[in-house]
Image (cartoon, helix red, strand yellow):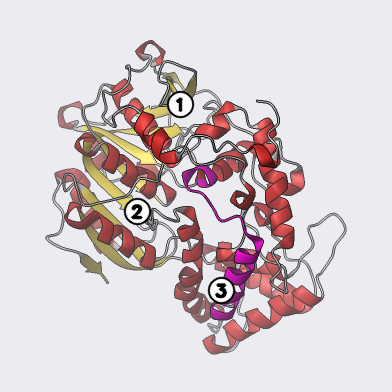
């Protein structure tokens, strides 16, 4: 693809017209997959894979509006059902992200499933479009722009978004210049269509799924586009389905998500006997964190060969640390380091080129983002005042603020139309996909869904934190198809 300058952004075809040009959204709307390519073999180079796990490749259209055109490869994995006599079908393990992969999940978290579930389903993992070893995407970003603090950027200490807007220009230019045709076709609706192509390649009439985080949105979109291809669908740690904002709503949700979880961290971080204790009482932890972040804003800690430890790095460690109780010690150690003027043992890292490209391309292609720096400054200022822990990041300018392409189709609106085949499971305290967003998905799905809210803390709920009631309810649904009569709370 030739370089695309800012003033040549591809806006010639309205999104509504492109939607009309897409084939009808049914499983048989496009020619069948290349079944000859679906040859199961031992998985090469998959670390720690169960010896029963096998791999295959399926070819799918890069552009579903041109099904006869270029194709891309998707890497699949499976562990067959453990009881041929009890086999019901396939259970897709749909990863988070955008940019996540479930290719090794049949060997990993799939083995946490109860035996009665594993008896009934082939466990199916996959690397989504753009993620290696599927045909991978890349923007050729400089190493500095692969940092998590660039891809999920924070405003400057004074609330300025100027540096973020400059990063957005740079990243967007690189993706337009180096990303090739695939960059245009990274999107949630295409991920959902890919799921259906995998279904067809497997020879299955319907799929069951255990989807987590961003995967809940992909699978909700799938259930909207292909409602009668769904069997038993579990949506775990759920994204807000707001069709006007999409990923902007997910980011904005971090404000409340952090507020939901921080008191739990504060109680842990003030417990007597905790080797990582940072304060005598839970009430002291929040003001301590805010003071430490403000001090690092003024006086960053520098160490040769290491990333600068400033207030935004501490905030980033906080957001990551609140995602799981098992990461609380990392956050506490970072706070202790900030207090002593040293660099903590663990600093935010960077992501691979394909993950950066897919994450950026998907959220930017799903919906148009505002372009106005002034608008972001206003939103950031409001967010910083109302939610000081997250300091405006959830409403900040992302690379999408300068994205060179317009969305090729409108976001899919999630509705209650379709079979009642969905079970949502959600922790009460989740900094990444907060309960408030899950409730919006539950409302959008209407009668199609039942929701199990778990008295738990952390990202991911099912089989993750030992809540017997929640785990038993989900396992029973996957095994029997029976859901609670109504929305349920698990203490």
Label 1: few (<14), some (14–19) or many (≥20) C-alpha neighbours in 10 Å: some
**Sequence-first tag of 1 and 2:** 1
Residue with the mark numbered 2: 236
Does 256 appear in magenta?
no
Question: How far is disc 2 from disc 3 in space, using C-alphas?
Answer: 27 Å
| Location of residue 366 in the rendering, given as x and y in whole percent from the top left corner | 47, 45
Looking at the rendering, the stretch of residues picked out in magenta corresponds to: 363-387
Residue with the mark numbered 1: 63
Q: Nearer the viewer, residue 426 or 80?
A: 426
| Badge count | 3
Label 3: few (<14), some (14–19) or many (≥20) C-alpha neighbours in 10 Å: many
Q: Relative to residue 94, is residue 264 depicted above or below?
A: below
Q: In which quadrant is the C terminus drawn?
A: bottom left
Q: Is there CB contact under 8 Å for labels 2 and 3?
A: no
Horizontal relation, residue 332 to residue 56: left or right: right
Q: Which mark is residue 383?
A: 3
Question: From this viewpoint, is residue 360 visible?
Answer: yes
Question: From this viewpoint, is residue 132 visible?
Answer: no
Does 365 appear in magenta?
yes
| Location of residue 135 in the rendering, given as x and y in whole percent from the top left corner | 54, 25
């Amino acid at each position: 693809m030739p370089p695309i300058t800012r003033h040549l952004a591809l806006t010639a075809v309205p999104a509504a017209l492109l939607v009309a040009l897409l084939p009808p959204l049914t499983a048989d709307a496009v020619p069948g997959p290349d079944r000859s390519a679906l040859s199961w073999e031992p998985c090469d180079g998959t670390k720690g894979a169960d010896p029963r796990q096998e791999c295959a490749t399926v070819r799918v259209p890069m552009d579903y509006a041109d099904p006869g055109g270029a194709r891309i490869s998707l890497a699949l994995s499976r562990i067959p059902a453990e009881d041929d006599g009890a086999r019901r079908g396939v259970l897709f393990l749909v990863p988070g992200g955008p940019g996540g992969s479930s290719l090794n999940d049949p060997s990993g978290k799939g083995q946490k499933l109860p035996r009665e579930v594993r008896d009934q389903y082939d466990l199916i993992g996959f690397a989504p479009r753009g993620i290696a070893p599927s045909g991978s995407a890349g923007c050729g970003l400089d190493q500095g722009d692969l940092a998590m603090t660039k891809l999920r950027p924070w405003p400057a200490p004074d609330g300025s978004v100027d540096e973020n807007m400059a990063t957005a220009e740079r990243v967007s230019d690189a993706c337009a210049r180096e990303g090739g045709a695939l960059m245009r076709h990274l999107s949630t609706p295409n991920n959902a269509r890919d799921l259906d192509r995998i279904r067809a390649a497997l020879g299955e009439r319907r799929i069951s799924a255990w989807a987590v985080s961003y995967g809940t949105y992909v699978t909700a979109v799938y259930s909207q586009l292909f409602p009668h291809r769904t069997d038993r669908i579990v949506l775990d740690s759920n994204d807000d389905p707001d069709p006007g904002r999409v990923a902007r709503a997910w980011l904005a949700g971090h404000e409340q998500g952090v507020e939901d979880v921080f008191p739990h961290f504060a109680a842990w971080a003030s417990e007597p006997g905790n080797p990582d204790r940072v304060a005598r009482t839970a009430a002291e932890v929040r003001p301590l964190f805010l003071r430490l972040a403000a001090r690092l804003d003024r006086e960053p800690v520098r160490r040769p060969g290491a990333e600068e430890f400033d207030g935004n790095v501490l905030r980033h460690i906080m957001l990551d640390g609140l995602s799981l109780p098992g990461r609380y010690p990392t956050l506490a150690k970072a706070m202790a380091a900030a207090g002593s003027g040293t660099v903590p043992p663990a600093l935010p890292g960077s992501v691979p080129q394909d993950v950066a490209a897919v994450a950026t391309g998907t959220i930017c292609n799903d919906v148009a983002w505002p372009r106005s720096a002034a608008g972001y400054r206003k939103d950031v200022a409001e967010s910083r005042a109302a939610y000081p822990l997250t300091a405006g990041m959830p409403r900040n300018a992302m690379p999408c603020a300068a994205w060179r392409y317009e969305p090729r189709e409108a976001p899919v609106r999630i509705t209650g139309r379709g079979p009642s085949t969905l079970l949502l499971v959600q922790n009460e305290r989740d900094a990444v996909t907060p309960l408030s967003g899950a409730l919006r998905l539950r409302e959008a799905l209407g009668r199609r869904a039942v929701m199990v809210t778990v008295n738990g803390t952390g990202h991911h709920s099912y089989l993750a934190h030992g809540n017997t009631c929640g785990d038993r309810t989900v396992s029973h649904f996957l095994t029997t198809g029976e859901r609670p009569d109504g929305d349920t709370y698990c203490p």
